[in-house]
Amino acid sequence: MHAHDRPRTLYQKVWDDHVVSTYQDGTQLIYVDRHLVQEVSSPQAFVGLDAAGRDLHRPEAHMAVADHAVPTTERTATLREGLAASQVARLSTNAARHHIPYVPMTDRRHGIVHVIGPELGFTLPGAVLVCGDSHTCTHGAFGAVAFGIGASECECVFATQVLRQSRQKSMRIRLEGVCPEGVQVKDVILAVIARIGVGGGVGHAMEFAGSAVRAMTMEQRMTLCNMAVEAGSRIGLVAPDETTFAYLKGRPLAPTDTEWDAAVANWRELASDSDAVFDQEFEIDVSSLSPFITWGTTPEESAPISGRVPDPAAIDDPRVRRRVERSLRYMALEPNTPLSGIAIDRVFIGSCTNGRIEDLRSAAAVVAGRKVHPRVQAMVVPGSASVRLQAEAEGLDRIFSEAGFDWRHSGCSMCVGMNDDRLLEGERCASTSNRNFEGRQGRGGRTHLMSPAMAAAAAVSGHLADVRDLWPEGTK
C-alpha cells in the first residue's frame, strides 16, 4: 500500500502535502505557504537576514502588521516615542526594504494578525501558515496547519520558505449536542481544557469535530482553535466545509473565478478519513455545559460560574494541592468562595480570541439598556479596524459607550499588556482573552477568563456573574 493510500487524519493530509524531505532522525522539511509577521517576534529575524545578506525567497507569501504594541486610544500616522514607536517603525522599515506587504495602523485592514489573516483571505484551507505568535493555531479553523514559531524560524521562512519540524501525533475532540442558552464557544473550550489539562494536547495536532463544531460559525471555530495552544497543542484544526467556503468567497486575497472552483474542489477533500486512527480521542456533550470562568492562573483552573473556589485541603495529590494554593494566593481568593459575586475592577472585551463582530454583538446584547458598575473600568477593543467599522455601522459602539465602556481602536491591547492597556497591581479583571498566568495583563494583575457575554455581565454587575440571569430573551 502506498503511504498515502492508508486512512489519514486531516492534519496528516495537509502535512503530507507539504513535506519536502525527511531526515534520518524522523524530522521533516516542510514547505510554508503563508507567514504573518508582527512587530514583536520579527526584529531578530530581519537582523539575521540582513547580516547574512539574504533576500526573501517569496515576499508575497508574507504579510506584516503591528498589533501587540500599538496604542488603542488613538490612531496617528506615526507613534511619537518609546518602545512601541520603535517596534512599529522598525517593522514598517523592514517590510518596505524586503518588499513585504505591510498593513499600517491607519489602514482599514489593520488589526490583530489572527483576525485580519482570515478577514483578508490570506488564511486558506490546506495551507501551512506560521507566525511568531503562539496563537497562530487560530487559523486552523479553516483546515490549515497553522502554528507559532520563534525568531530563528521566522528568519528561516524569510530566506527559504521551508522549516524543519517534527510531525505531531493526532488527537480528536468530539463536541456533540447543542449549547444551552447563555453558553458560548469560549465556555466550551474552557471546559475542554479543564477536562484534558493544559498539557493534555502536548505533541498532538488537535482536531475539533462533531455536530456542535459543524454547527459553529467561522468566528466560533476560530475561538475554539485559538485556545488549542492553552491545552498544550501547537495546532488546532477544523475540517473545511460549506461554512468555510461561504466565509472565504470574495475575500480580497482568496482565489477567484475558475481558480476558486478548483480550490473548493481541492478543499472538499480535506477531511479526516472515516477510518483514520487518532492517537487520542475525547468527547464532550456541550448540551450539559454551563458558562465557565477561570479562578486560577491557567485556563485549566476553571469551573462553571455556579461553582466555588476549590479548597486545597480537599485535594489528595500534593503537587496539585501546592499548585492550587499558589494560584489562590496570587488571585487573593479564599477556598470555597462562590465564584459568582467576586468583585472586579476592570473588564476587557477583545483579543484574537474574542474580538470579532459576533463577540461584540453578544456582549452588546447583554449591555444594552444597562450601565457599567460605578466601580468598574471597562473597555471594548475590536480585533480589527473592519470589525470596528462594522460594529459602528450596527450601532454597537453607541450601546457600549452609553453603558460606560471605553470604545477603542484595534490591537492586542490588554490581552498582552505590552502597551498602555494594562492592569495595576492587585486589580481584578474579567477578560475575554486567552491567558491568565501571573502578570499576563500587568504586573500583579489578576485575570479571570470568560466569554464576551460573561464579561459584559461582570461589567454591569460589578462582580463575576452568571449571564443567564441577565440574558435577553431569545438571544444565544
Image (spheres, grey):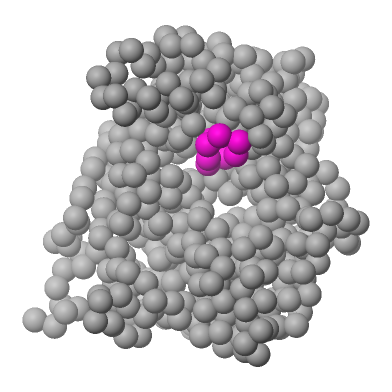
- How far from the left and from the top, in percent, is residue 459? 66, 22
Q: Is residue 202 above or below residue 153?
A: above
Residue 56: give x, y in percent of width and height: 61, 86
> Quick check: can you spot residue 101?
yes
Q: Based on the picture, tell me whether residue 461 belongs to the magenta stretch.
A: no
Extent of the magenta region = 432-440
Query: For residue 370, which quarter of the picture?
Result: top right
Would residue 270 appear left or right of 117 to someone viewing this image? left
**Quadrant that contains the N terminus:** bottom left
Q: Left or right: 275 with respect to 115? A: left
Q: Is residue 189 left or right of residue 417?
A: left
Q: Position of residue 220 (x, y in %)?
A: 48, 46
Residue 297, image x and y in percent?
49, 31
Q: Residue at the spot x=45%, y=35% of the render? A: 299
Looking at the image, which residue is at 64% across and 19% down? Answer: 344
Residue at horizontal 62 percent and vertical 87 percent from the top: 52
Out of 13 and 429, give the one closest to the viewer.
Answer: 429
Please say whether residue 436 is one of the residues in the magenta stretch: yes
Does residue 455 show up?
no
Q: Residue at x 52, y 79 (%)?
A: 156
Picture mark count: 0
Q: Please name the predominant secondary structure of the magenta segment in the image.
A: loop
Q: Please tell me whether residue 331 is drawn above or below residue 122 in the rendered image.
A: above
Residue 4 vs residue 419, the one in the foreground: 419
Q: Is residue 269 above or below residue 216?
A: below
